[in-house]
Amino acid sequence: MDYKTLVAQTLAEQIGDVLSEEQIYQLLEKPKSSDHGDIAFPVFSLAKTYRKAPQQIAADLGEKISNPAFEKVVVVGPYLNFFLNKEMVSDEVLKAILKEGAAYGNQTVGQGRNIPIDLSSPNIAKPISMGHLRSTVIGNAIANIVQKIGYNPIKINHLGDWGTQFGKLIVAYKLWGDEEKVKAEPIQELLRLYVQFHEVAEEKTELEDEARAWFKKLEDGDTEATELWSWFREESLSEFNHIYQLLGIEFDSYNGEAFYNDKMDEIIEIMEEKHLLQENRGAEIVDLEKYNLNPALIRKSDGATLYITRDLAAALYRKRNYDFAQSIYVVGNEQSNHFKQLKAVLLEMGFDWSNDMVHTPFGLITQGGKKLSTRKGKIVLLEEVLNEATKLAKEQISAKNPDLADKDAVAKDVGVGAVVFHDLKNDRMNNFDFVLEEVVRFEGETGPYVQYTHARSKSILRKAGQTPNHAASLALTDPYSWEVIKVLKEFPETVMKSYEKLEPSVIAKHSIQLAQYFNRFYANVKVLEDHPEKEGRIALVEAVSTVLKEDLRLLGLNAPNEM
Ligand code: ARG
């Protein structure tokens, strides 16, 4: 039972004529300090009806309430504060977690409906950027979260594998390329060719025409062009896959922009039927003035389609193929206009499911306060960051626990976990400055701290040498347990909240709080000593271990049993 609901129900029995149970529920607060109780009801909104001072109303109301679920009900200023019955609540919460295990907090609101999530989506032949890393880890966490509440997430890596730049690459490769070099270091070599193309084309402008011609060939399915393109794509993808493997992230689809090459004609036809296209200096645009947006450029004067044209085709494809409840795009905030235009054009085309498309933006990673730039060579190579973090993790682990088996696997979980958690712990819209020492920090509010706390709970359970007896009373009465119990109890609502805001940081904060309270509990309560509440204490350790692991899993981190 959710105790907020119980409080709302109990109050509604008294004041249901003034406020509905739902309204009361919405008004309930969490007292600032737990000395003041667990759930607080502000009585202001009753003052008009009862024509009494708020304190008096609270006092009168408090006297009428008696329910064994509440230890006491106290008036604090204009608030009526409820203290939950610790024994009852702890027994109930712990039993639920022991019984449900990792399924604790699972919900059915999604009813199995599909939510495609567009994430990662790097561009072929270019290095994967920190922005793409953010999209990957945020998108992956969101996929886990929507799954936890009963949706079916579909992770789509919408690769940037189409566009005029492929014409340029083909020209550059044919002029200066070397197969062996591309195979050895695909991204670096392809990037080098791309840069060389631009340098040379400044003088020899006819190269631009050649590039356009090659892209046209590619669009028309020419064999040589297609073979080169698909080879570049595969080589790039295999390099991206190193990073995905390090992160432990898999995709359900790699349908990128190229996949929609033969699906754009239909989009253009629908627009023509609806008379949406206007000519503008040879190009075709859709006017979006009534949305207060710049016109969307759909087709260039040479007939070439654009990024947004492919996104229009992709959106329609996803609707038809997945009949989605929502369609989520985890893409940097700098593309927010693009997504506004995309949604507006779809509305103009008569697709009201456009309203179920959600752009989930995130802030920039900066360095020294400045935007990271690929062109000026300031790019931080992601793989290096992940490897460096793993190396530092291994040093720390070897110092703390020299006998640990499988150190390399644990170091990878912890090193990569540090990078991922660092990204997810703050609101996704916050910008953050990239400082390697910060990213791979293990103390304080970090992934390794949560992982370490989880491993500690496992070690306590090993020492206890017993699994909690589900049938026994698991009631706990000390104040340290109580703080832990409350955070455990909040887990299901926390998952829901993180879904409503599409905000993994809500889960990250929950895990930090749970770890902190648990460590405080462990420092003050002798779990392994003989005590009437020993059974409950061991159950609490197990419940914490289960929920911390689930918090970490939702964020995309592993939870090693020892470290
Ligand atoms: N490839 C794009 C970029 O790197 C991101 C694609 C995002 N997804 C989308 N459906 N537009 O900027």
Image (cartoon, rainbow, N blue to C red):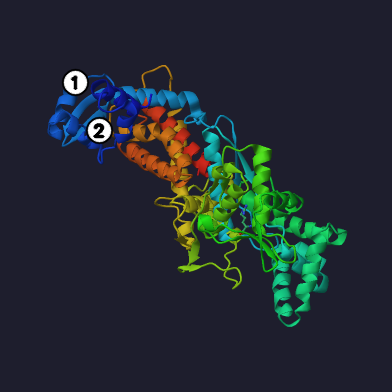
Relative horizontal placement of residue 156, taking residue 144 as reference (left or right) = right
Q: Earlier in the sequence, mark 1 or mark 2?
A: 2
Q: Say left or right for 213 vs 33.
A: right
Q: Is residue 557 rendered to the left or right of residue 227?
A: left
Instruction: Locate residue 71, reporting x and y percent.
Output: 24, 24
Give ligand 1's quarter of the image: bottom right
Disc assigned to residue 64: 1
Check the image and report above or below for 509 versus 439.
Answer: above
Residue 556 is at least partly visible in this image: no
Q: Position of residue 368 (x, y in %)?
A: 46, 69
Q: What residue is shown at x 52% (from left), y 50% (from top)? A: 360
Vertical arrangement, residue 131 with respect to residue 554, above or below = below
Q: Residue at x 34, y 33 (%)?
A: 486
- Graded by Cα atoms within 10 Å as few (under 14), some (14 to 19) or many (20 or more), the crowding at tag 1 reads few
Q: Which residue is mark 2?
A: 41
CB atoms at circles 1 and 2 under 8 Å apart? Answer: no
Q: Is residue 273 above or below residue 232?
A: above
Three-letter residue code for mark 2: Phe
Q: Name the disc covering residue 425, or none.
A: none
For this orientation, the residue located farthest to the bottom is 203
Give SS at disc 2.
Answer: strand
Q: Amino acid at mark 1?
A: Lys
Separation of disc 1 and disc 2 at Cα? 15 Å
Q: Relative to the observer, which residue lies in front, 393 or 84?
A: 84
The yes-or-no answer for disc 2 within 8 Å of ligand 1 is no
Can residue 71 be seen here? The reply is: yes
**To which quarter of the image does residue 75 belong?**
top left
> Relative to residue 235, is residue 222 drawn left or right?
right
Along the line of sight, which residue is nearer the eye, 271 or 432?
271
Horizontal and vertical percent position of residue 348? 60, 49
Front in this rendered view, residue 96 or 371: 371
